[in-house]
Amino acid sequence: MLQAMSGEALFMGRLSHDGDLLAELTRLCRERGITAGWISAIGAVKRARVGFYDQVARQYCFLDLDLPLEITNLTGNVSLKDGETFVHAHVTFADDAGRAFGGHLAPGTILFAGEVLIRSFATTAFQRDLDAETGLFLWRG
Ligand code: ZN
């Protein structure tokens, strides 16, 4: 299912030092009333927590990276879950040797600095429900 998007608005801003990256993105989207959108960000974190979805066990495993890292890329989307603005983001980090780590962005990733671009769309069509095939909360098909 593909849906044409309209009512585009762009927001660009700085993220808070010591803020939780996922909570910060969610707060900014909720403050602007964004119900659908796309997020891109770069910056640095003091530590990171990312998830990997175990497709057999149908649960997330988490990796804690307790070291300073660059955010080399964050890509995410905004939709609705239980009627609330919900951010889903994946992120890639690099350490001081350029080694990359990444995964599903989880709470517990603490910002050093960050810059974000959010592209929002005027729709409430993207809502998440539990998907029986995957065990994930996916967009209604
Ligand atoms: Zn994910």
Image (spheres, rainbow, N blue to C red):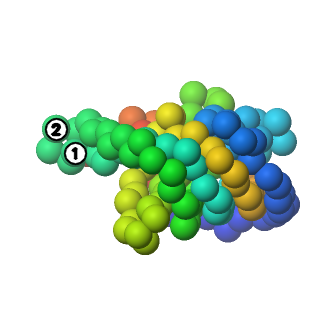
Q: Which residue is drawn at 39% across and 54% down?
A: 103
Viewer can see residue 127: no
Estimate the x, y position of residue 66 in percent, counting from the top left.
42, 42
Label 2 element class: loop
When the figure is inspected, residue 139 is found, relative to residue 30, above or below; the finding is below
Separation of residues labelled 2 and 1 (CA atoms): 5 Å
Circle on res. 57: 2
In this rendered view, identify the residue nearer to me: 42 or 79: 42
Residue at the far left in the pictured view: 56
Q: Which residue lies furthest to the front in this view?
A: 96
The type of residue carrying mark 1 is: Asp
In percent of width and height, residue 4 lies at: 67, 67
> Quick one: 42 or 86, which is closer to the camera?
42
* Residue 74 in sight from this viewpoint: yes
Is label 1 within 8 A of ligand 1 (CB to nearest ligand atom)? Answer: no
Q: Label 1: which residue? A: 54
Q: Residue 123 appears at what percent x and percent y?
A: 73, 50
Task: In the rendered structure, find residue 11 and report the number of the disc placed on it.
Answer: none
Q: Which amino acid does label 2 sit on?
A: Ala
138 horizontally vs 83: left or right: left
Would you say 39 lies left or right of 127 here? Answer: right
Instruction: Mark 2: give few (<14), some (14-19) or many (20+) Cα within 10 Å.
Output: few
Question: How many numbered discs, if any?
Answer: 2
The answer to whether the residue labelled 2 contacts the one labelled 1, judged by CB atoms less than 8 Å apart, is yes
Q: How crowded is mark 1: few (under 14 residues within 10 Å), some or many (20 or more)?
A: few
Q: Is residue 33 left or right of residue 62?
A: right
Q: Which residue is drawn at 56% across and 34% down?
A: 81
Q: Which residue is drawn at 51% across and 56% down?
A: 69
User: Is 84 situated above or below 63?
Assistant: above
